[in-house]
């Protein structure tokens, strides 16, 4: 086969990219802007395109800053804007902490309220100001570099050319000569992280990329399998990272070991995590955003009176710090059962603040880390095991209302699972039956489950509380759930989140919506609307034939066993009282406010024997694992996963 030339590949790839939305700007606009900027500053076009892809996936984000104060397709950083922009969102107070184990010491009493239950934090260290440096190099106004994508691309090209000069390189068309400049563009301060960023850029050049941006621009980076840099990690011109012994990072990621505090506190307590006795079972990896800058989070985790997690990821370059070994129990999920069986990742960022967005560099570093951890600890790559903090249930009825909502609707689960190598595809060749019947009345060849899967960019849902105006409309990974198939009908009720009120359209309220990748039992179809079973009720979401927000799915379902009108739902899979040895306080299973009625079906995620980790003090020698006989099924009951006792339900194929 003859080797395809660049223009030929470009033409072929262009055919694979869907057309931009009606009324969008010229398809060639952004592509031409990259070509002009590359020519003007002597930067290889493939390098410029790949660097921009690693920063923003070529998106403009409506001129709003990232979580690390970067603007536009080239992520030009303006520290004066503040991380995530100057506009703080309206966030409800309240934090469930790590409730549920009254015997486990914690630093809860020592924390000071900061609006979201976290401790008062030190000021952040501002990032390097690349936006104003780009203004100096191009002569363009900072405001134009923030607002105009074409100007922003010129600024990024000028910065790359400036980095090339600083590392002793020359302008030229060979991408292999630009490794040092690409590494420095990351903003990393150590050679390992800069090299990891540059390696991802060159991997993108070799594989190619093509997509339509958030503002309707078709952009293509032709694949160049021969692109290989002539410089290696030791030639970035940056200092090496501090000596690190991060025990749970893949070799290709330059992880830093910044251990969390583990020490005795006054009055007999200890902080800020626990050491597990023996080999810890790991069922979950929990994705958080930190609602704080990276340097603030990495300082807080060293405070013994604060909480802890396993990894912190930096937005600008994807740098990773590890704080706990995977065998240690972090205090991060707000539910002790999940803490004892999970690894927690905090990402620099904000659920909703000034339109803040997550960088591609951080998405990729996170995905590489999670893929490695999942393989090492045998965690399945699905939404029953890879959870958001917003999917973790309250441990007891008293804690349900205060559970956290991060990473929220703007975390792109669809893209993230693609990066994990486990795309959210549903079941091909099966169609959801278009009958308005209960799950058990469907034809045998119809799907009994659906997976929520809207097109993130096109799914411009309305939310309140996430911008200066208090409202915003942008792409998201969630769908609104209504009591009837009509946008005018109320959102479904969540009696745990809102005991006396209605669900809201707040960006911080998950009560009336479902998220990408979650699987629910199909409960009916009417016109352009699909129904699912959700929190004990039928919930409807807009799912038109021309722009589906769900795909057929398969998997086991649970329903109350014959003879039961309903079954209890739990926030933790704790043992029966008889399993506790003398001296260890019994942790009552404590059913939540919800029940699962007869005739309804819910997707089964995993099944486990009951267990409880008792931490009797500072020394791991005092810890005990209480194992019970009760078997629990984890189900997707609402936006959060919950548990039912296996003896109460029947498992049916889905």
Image (cartoon, grey):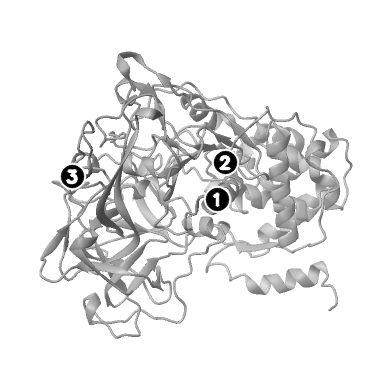
* Residue highlighted by disc 3: 578
Query: Nearest the camera: 216 or 266?
Result: 266
* Residue highlighted by disc 1: 376
C-alpha distance separating marks 3 and 1: 34 Å
Please determine whether, in this image, residue 593 is positioned above or below residue 486. Answer: above
| SS for dot 3 | helix
Query: Nearest the camera: 5 or 561?
Result: 561
Q: Which mark is residue 166?
A: none
Which residue occupies the extreme front position in the image? Answer: 582
Query: Nearest the camera: 363 or 455?
Result: 363
Q: Residues within 10 Å of mark 2 (few under 14, many from 20)?
A: some
Q: Which of the 4 image quadrants contains residue 625? A: top left
Q: Write the residue at 53% across / 32% down.
A: 294
How far from the left and from the top, in percent, is residue 144?
63, 41
Residue 124 appears left or right of 583: right
The C terminus: image quadrant: bottom left
| SS for dot 2 | loop
How far from the left and from the top, in percent, is residue 227?
81, 57
Mark 2 touches mark 3? (CB < 8 Å): no
């Amino acid at each position: 086969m003859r080797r395809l030339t660049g223009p030929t590949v470009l033409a072929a790839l262009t055919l694979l990219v869907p057309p931009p939305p009606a009324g969008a700007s010229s398809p060639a606009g952004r592509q031409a802007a990259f070509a002009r900027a590359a020519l003007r500053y002597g930067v290889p076009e493939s390098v410029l395109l790949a660097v921009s892809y690693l920063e923003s996936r070529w998106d403009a984000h409506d001129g709003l800053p990232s979580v690390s104060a970067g603007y536009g397709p080239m992520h030009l950083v303006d520290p004066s804007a503040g991380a995530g922009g100057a506009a703080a969102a309206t966030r409800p107070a309240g934090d469930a902490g790590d409730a549920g184990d009254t015997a486990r010491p914690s630093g809860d009493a020592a924390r000071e309220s900061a609006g979201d239950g976290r401790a008062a934090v030190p000021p952040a260290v501002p990032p390097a100001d690349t936006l104003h440096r780009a203004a100096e190099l191009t002569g363009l106004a900072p405001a134009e570099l923030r607002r105009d994508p074409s100007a922003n691309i010129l600024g990024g090209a000028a910065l790359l050319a400036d980095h090339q000069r600083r590392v002793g390189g020359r302008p030229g068309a060979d991408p292999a000569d630009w490794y040092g400049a690409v590494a420095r563009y990351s903003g990393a301060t150590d050679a390992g992280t800069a090299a990891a960023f540059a390696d991802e850029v060159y991997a993108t050049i070799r594989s190619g990329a093509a997509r339509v941006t958030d503002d309707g621009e078709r952009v293509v980076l032709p694949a160049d399998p021969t692109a290989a840099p002539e410089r290696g990690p030791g030639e970035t011109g940056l200092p090496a990272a501090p000596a690190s012994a991060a025990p749970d990072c893949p070799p290709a990621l330059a992880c830093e070991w910044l251990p969390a505090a583990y020490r005795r506190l006054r009055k007999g307590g200890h902080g800020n995590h626990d050491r597990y006795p023996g080999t810890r079972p790991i069922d979950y990896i929990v994705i958080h955003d930190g609602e704080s800058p990276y340097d603030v989070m990495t300082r807080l985790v060293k405070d013994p009176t604060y909480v802890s997690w396993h990894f912190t990821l930096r937005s600008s370059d994807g740098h990773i710090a590890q704080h706990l070994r995977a065998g240690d129990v972090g205090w991060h999920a707000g539910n002790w059962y999940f803490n004892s069986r999970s690894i927690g990742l905090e990402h620099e960022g904000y659920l909703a603040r000034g339109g803040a967005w997550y960088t591609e560099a951080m998405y990729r570093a996170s995905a590489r880390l999670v893929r490695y951890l999942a393989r090492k600890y045998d965690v399945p790559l699905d939404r029953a095991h890879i959870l958001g903090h917003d999917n973790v249930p309250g441990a007891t009825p008293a804690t349900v209302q205060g559970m956290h909502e991060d990473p929220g609707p703007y975390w792109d689960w669809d893209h993230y699972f693609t990066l994990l190598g486990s795309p959210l595809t549903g079941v091909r060749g099966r169609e959801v039956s278009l009958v308005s019947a209960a799950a058990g009345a469907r034809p045998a060849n119809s799907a009994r489950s659906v997976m929520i899967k809207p097109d993130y960019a096109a799914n411009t849902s309305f939310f309140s509380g996430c911008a200066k105006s208090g409202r915003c409309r942008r792409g998201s990974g969630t769908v609104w759930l209504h009591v009837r198939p009509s946008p005018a009908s109320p959102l479904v009720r969540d009696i745990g989140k809102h005991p006396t009120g209605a669900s809201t359209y707040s960006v911080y309220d998950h009560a009336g919506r479902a998220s990408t990748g979650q699987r629910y039992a199909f409960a009916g179809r009417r016109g352009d609307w699909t129904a699912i079973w959700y929190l004990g009720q039928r919930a409807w979401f807009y799912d038109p034939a021309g722009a589906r927000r769900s795909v057929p799915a398969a998997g086991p379902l649970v329903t109350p066993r014959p003879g039961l009108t309903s079954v209890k739902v739990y926030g933790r899979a704790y043992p029966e009282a008889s399993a506790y040895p003398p001296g260890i306080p019994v942790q009552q299973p404590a059913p939540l406010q919800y029940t699962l009625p007869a005739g309804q079906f819910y997707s089964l995620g995993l099944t486990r024997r009951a267990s409880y980790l008792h931490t009797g003090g500072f020394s791991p020698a005092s810890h005990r694992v209480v194992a019970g006989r009760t078997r629990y099924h984890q189900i997707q009951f609402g936006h959060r996963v919950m548990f039912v006792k296996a003896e109460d339900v029947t498992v049916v194929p889905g």
